[in-house]
Image (cartoon, helix red, strand yellow):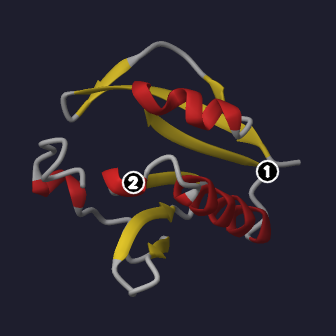
Amino acid sequence: MFIDEQGVPEALEWDEHDDDSVHFLALAEDGSPIGCARLLPDGHVGRMAVLPGWRGRGVGRALLAAALAAARARGHAVLRLSAQTHAAAFYARAGFMAQGPVYDEAGIPHVAMQKDLA
């Protein structure tokens, strides 16, 4: 999704955190992948995406809920993420608060967000 739909260079998609992260995959009834997310060991959510045809149908909420549950189970007091600005309202509805100014990441405007889990 990031590479094809948003033009993010493939080299930026794979990093040293993949092996140590918890990965979440949303599947359609036929078993095809429709969304994903990951929880890094430091309590950041990243690589969250839902295929266009599945957006607005609760897939993102379910992925975020799974990441929140995993973060709590791991003892994280705060969950952080780097939201694309067009998705910031989605995260705000889940209780995340913007932290600081908008910045560029891979040519896309982002804002840091966090949610207290305590």
**Eyeballing the image, is 60 above or below 94?**
below
Q: Nearer the viewer, residue 64 or 101?
A: 64
Rendering coords of residue 98 (x, y %): 60, 23
Tell me the quarter of the picture where residue 31 sits: bottom left
Amino acid residing under circle 2: Ala
Which label lies toward us, 1 or 2? 2
Q: Is residue 39 above or below residue 106?
A: below
Residue 33 coordinates in the image, percent (x, y):
35, 75
Q: Please, what secondary structure does the residue beneath circle 1 have? A: loop
Say left or right for 74 vs 54. Answer: right
In this picture, residue 93 sits left or right of residue 1 = right
Q: Does residue 96 appear in the picture of this structure? A: no
**Residue 50 placement: quadrant:** bottom left
Q: Nearer the viewer, residue 67 or 101?
A: 67
Compared with 78, 100 (above or below) is above
Q: CA distance from mark 1 to mark 2?
A: 24 Å
Residue holding disc 2: 49
The mark found on residue 4 in the picture is: none
Residue lying furthest top: 101
Residue shown at 55% from the left, 51% from the top: 44
* Residue named by callout 1: 77
For the question of whether residue 73 can be seen, the reply is yes
Instruction: Answer with mark 1 or mark 2, whichever residue precedes in sequence.
Output: 2
x 62%, y 62%: residue: 62
- Residue at screen point 60% across, 37% down: 91
Q: Residue furthest bottom?
A: 31
**Label 1: how many residues lie within 10 Å, few (<14), some (14-19) or many (20+)?**
few
Q: Amino acid at mark 1?
A: Ala
Task: Residue 11 in the image: state x and y as whole percent.
Answer: 12, 56
Image coords of residue 21 (percent x, y)? 48, 71
